[in-house]
Image: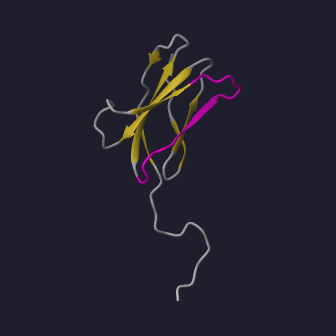
Amino acid sequence: MAVPQLQFKDCELDSITLSWERAEGTGYKLEFREILVSDWAGCRSIAIAPEQSSSTEMSTKVTGLNPSSSYIFRLYTVTAAGQEVGPGPEIAFDTEVVSCAPTNKSCCTIS
């Protein structure tokens, strides 16, 4: 059983959405850590149950991340018997940068 390649889908200030090609009846475990952390010992992980769907794509939104930060992600497949296969290749993505620029077109007058 091969581990699918993670793909970037979207990011916000405190979240990153990833997707991958779904295998029928397979669960997944997504591990992630900030890029400055040197090992996986204290990483966070998300268990993702198998989906009964006609879609060939799975996706998940990882929340609670730090703005303007880089994270490394890796994916495991989980068999029906609970055996983990992987991890797949590690891949790094960034959350959005905090900006001082206005986010809308409204303005105010300073007297």
Q: Is residue 59 found inside the magenta-colored segment of the image?
A: yes
Q: Is residue 69 found inside the magenta-colored segment of the image?
A: no
Q: Residue at x 50, y 34 (%)?
A: 6
Quadrant hosting residue 32: top left
The percent position of residue 88, horizontal first and vertical second, equals: 44, 26
Quadrant hosting residue 37: top left
Q: Residue at x 63, y 19 (%)?
A: 24
Instruction: Identify the coloring.
Output: secondary structure
Q: Going by the picture, which residue comes out furthest to the front?
A: 111
Q: Going by the picture, which residue comes out furthest to the top?
A: 81
The percent position of residue 26, horizontal first and vertical second, equals: 57, 19
Q: Going by the picture, which residue comes out furthest to the right?
A: 54
Q: Residue at x 47, y 13 (%)?
A: 83
Query: In terms of depth relative to the viewer, which is nearer, 7 or 33?
Result: 33
Quadrant hosting residue 43: top left
Give the residues drawn in magenta, as a range.
Answer: 49-68
Query: In terms of depth relative to the viewer, which is nearer, 51 or 54?
Result: 51
Number of numbered markers: 0
Q: Residue at x 68, y 29 (%)?
A: 55
Give the overall secondary structure of the magenta segment. loop
Q: Going by the picture, which residue comes out furthest to the bottom?
A: 111
In the displayed structure, 67 sits above or below 77; it is below
The percent position of residue 46, horizontal first and vertical second, equals: 49, 30
In the displayed structure, 83 sits above or below 35; it is above
The percent position of residue 31, horizontal first and vertical second, equals: 43, 31
Left or right for 15, reference 58: left
Left or right for 84, reference 104: left
